Amino acid sequence: MELIDLTVYGISKNDKPIRMKELLILRKPLCDFAGDFGEYGVDGEAPADYCTEFMLIKKDWNVVMLKIFFGEMDNVLHDVETYFNNQYQYSWLEDDFVKDLIRDVDKSEVESPECIMSPVLRQIPPTRLSGGTKAVILMKYIQDRVINASNCGDNCSKWILKLGKQRDLTINLHHIMEFEDEDFEIEILNNHMIVHNMAELVNVAVEYI
């Protein structure tokens, strides 16, 4: 028997198959399978060809990707400004990811951990960075809290996606953020659906915000 990866599909309201999550499966005829895939976190029944060819053997396999919960949730850090201004570490400003983020979003250069050169404000401390930049930096370094990404503008979205490709990242949103990439993989935690573009994301998000 061979272990492979398979995309499992759920059925949307308009009967269109929508990818839900990747699961570890065992290649094996499914002669006596009964019932739907509900216990595996998939809504509705999978298409018939998947039902007859495969048996799911694990439901908790996590794929590293960006995860979004829309609306109120527990353990969320909302006051990004106050937290960052009192908790940031100089070492954070020495990270290449952070330097590139600041260069792109704030159009500023990190000259040292204590000094950032802004084209408008000239020399500023890290506490004068934009709220969106602070939020993304906290997403990278504060991993025991969920950051309210509604502190960010759409210009932060590609950096959030990059973080989501590096590690399992959950953010909270109270609005629909515009993600620049045409294709991406984001899990919506409200219903555990995986979306791949803005059209799919908007279609799901409007039900929760």
Image (spheres, rainbow, N blue to C red):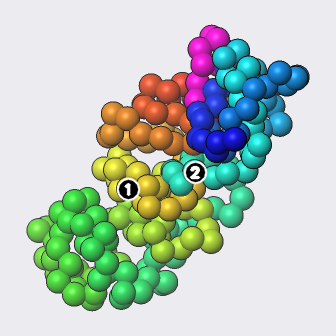
**Residue visible at 73% across and 32% down in the picture:** 28
Q: Residue 75, how many percent across, how many down?
A: 68, 64
Instruction: Left or right? Give the position of 46 relative to 89.
Output: right
The residue nearer to you, when weighing 167 against 105, is: 167
- Give the position of the C terminus as an image quadrant: top right
Mark 2 residue element: loop
Vertical position of residue 78 compared to residue 156: above or below: below
The magenta-colored residue range is 12-20
Does residue 103 appear in the picture of this structure?
yes
Q: CA distance from mark 1 to mark 2?
A: 15 Å
Badge 1 density bin: few <14, some 14–19, many ≥20, Cα 10 Å: few
Instruction: Tell me the crowding category of disc 2: few under 14, some 14 to 19, or many 20 or more residues within 10 angstroms, Cα based.
Output: few
Going by the numbered disc 1, the residue's amino acid type is: Lys
Percent position of residue 93, x then y: 31, 80
Q: Which mark is residue 107?
A: none
Q: Which of the 4 quarters of the picture holds residue 132?
A: bottom left
Disc 1 designates what residue? 162
Q: Which residue is mark 2?
A: 63
As shown in the figure, which amino acid type bears the numbered disc 2? Val
The secondary structure type at the circle numbered 1 is helix
Q: Camera-side residue: 103 or 17?
A: 17
Q: Position of residue 146 (x, y in %)?
A: 59, 62
